[in-house]
Image (spheres, grey):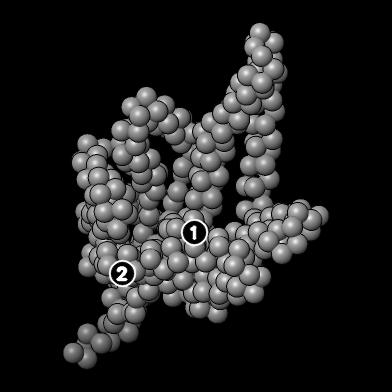
Amino acid sequence: MHDVAAAAGAFPIDTTAPAEDPPAARTLRFAFTGSGREYFRIWVVNLLLTLASLGIYSAWAKVRRLQYFDRNTTLAGARFDFHGNPKAILRGRVLAVLLLVAYHYAFGISLTAGLATIAMLLASLPWLIRGALRFRLGNTSYRGLHFHFSGSAPMAYRVYLAPIAVFLLPGVLVAVYGETPWVTVAWLLYLGWPLMYAWMKHYQYGYVAYGDQASSNALTVPGFFSIYVRGSLLATSIVIVAFLAGVVAMPLGALMPVRSAAVAIGLIVGGGMALMAYVLLGPYQQVRVMNLCLRHTSFPGVRLVSNLSARDFARLQLKNLALTLLTLGLYRPFAVVSAYRYRLDHLALDVDEGFDHVVSRVTAGGGAAGDGAADFVGLDLSW
């Protein structure tokens, strides 16, 4: 042993292990295994039962729809799932109907009732929106682990009070003072919408967790202003094109009575603007916002990749619109599936270690009342 030690001392051995290269990122892609034909059967049943039940079945229809899309969405060989309770969603929709009725008729009762209703909406809607995010994510699972939303209630009020107030203010001014110049000033507050929308998206994407792995979000306000400025230029182009279409239609209008000509030109201009806004402006805004949000959201060792094309998505939406109109609405479920599949085909994850390191953590879920209410008032809660 002594000789071996001496030999080792005479010839030192470098025991330092070579530095290991960091593991290469692996790209995981989403896939959708459903089909328009399968969803068509679910859509027809949901529609008929919703009509037969005067809307009551809509809560069960929503759960069936979300379960179908989640259970047919795969990532790395595993499927997502949705576990929402239809009765909880129905209670939320009843609450939503009550809020809408109060909003529409309170000022007709008295000024005091109207102002009290506005105060109630300002106090409750941020809490309901936060509950909707918690309900939706808390009832979505992947590989047996649930997502959850950790955004706080005080932060929800800081994020959502301003856009809710801007949305309600013009109607309140009209109800209290009638048509005054202040109503126009109130509409000008929408110039700050990109800032408010950036806050909302940062809140929605920055406080998501899967198991004990929390998301981080690096969204910046200038990115949203850029999207809305370009969208405004696109909207201006749509107005100009629609106006030119009306000018071209004027010679045809000369062959008609004055009233009929005005109606015809109005339909051409209005219909052209609506069509181009749906086909161009809508897809542009959706794609740019989704790319911006997803590319700036990550989890520990996981980065989201989104490369949606506004041009390709616009062509897809134009095709879906044409086929839906030609089939009198029957192509609608096929259109929904094709748009959903397109989004998934352009969404991926760059993963360093996979999901095996994620540890499940039990968390309290949000209230379903917020989810139902959000569906009715049209707030954007999409993940």
Query: Where does residue 16 sit, x and y in percent of width and height?
Result: 36, 75
Q: Is residue 376 visible?
A: yes
Please tell me whether residue 30 is drawn above or below residue 333 in the rendered image. Answer: below
| Secondary structure found at label 1 | helix
Q: Observer-nearest residue: 332 or 198?
A: 332
Residue indicated by mark 1:
377
Q: Nearer the viewer, residue 177 or 351?
A: 177
Q: Residue at x 28, y 87 (%)?
A: 6
Q: Position of residue 13 (x, y in %)?
A: 32, 76
Q: Report the quarter where the C terminus lies.
A: bottom left
Q: Which mark is residue 180?
A: none
Q: Nearer the viewer, residue 50 or 338?
A: 50
Q: Residue at x 44, y 51 (%)?
A: 305
**Residue 35 occupies which quadrant of the picture?**
top left
The three-letter code of the residue at mark 1 reads Val
List the single residue furthest toward the top: 255
* Residue positioned most to the bottom: 2
Q: Outermost residue, front direction?
A: 109
Contact, mark 1 vs mark 2 (Cβ under 8 Å): no
Name which quarter of the figure residue 180 lies in. Answer: bottom right
Helix, strand or loop under label 2: helix
Number of numbered discs? 2
Q: Which residue is mark 2?
A: 88
Question: Against 148, is 67 above or below?
Answer: above
Residue 39, above or below 67: above
Is disc 2 surrounded by few (<14), some (14 to 19) or many (20+) residues within 10 Å? some
247 in relation to 111, above or below? above
Disc 1/disc 2 C-alpha distance (Å): 17 Å
| Residue appearing at x 24%, y 42% in the figure | 44
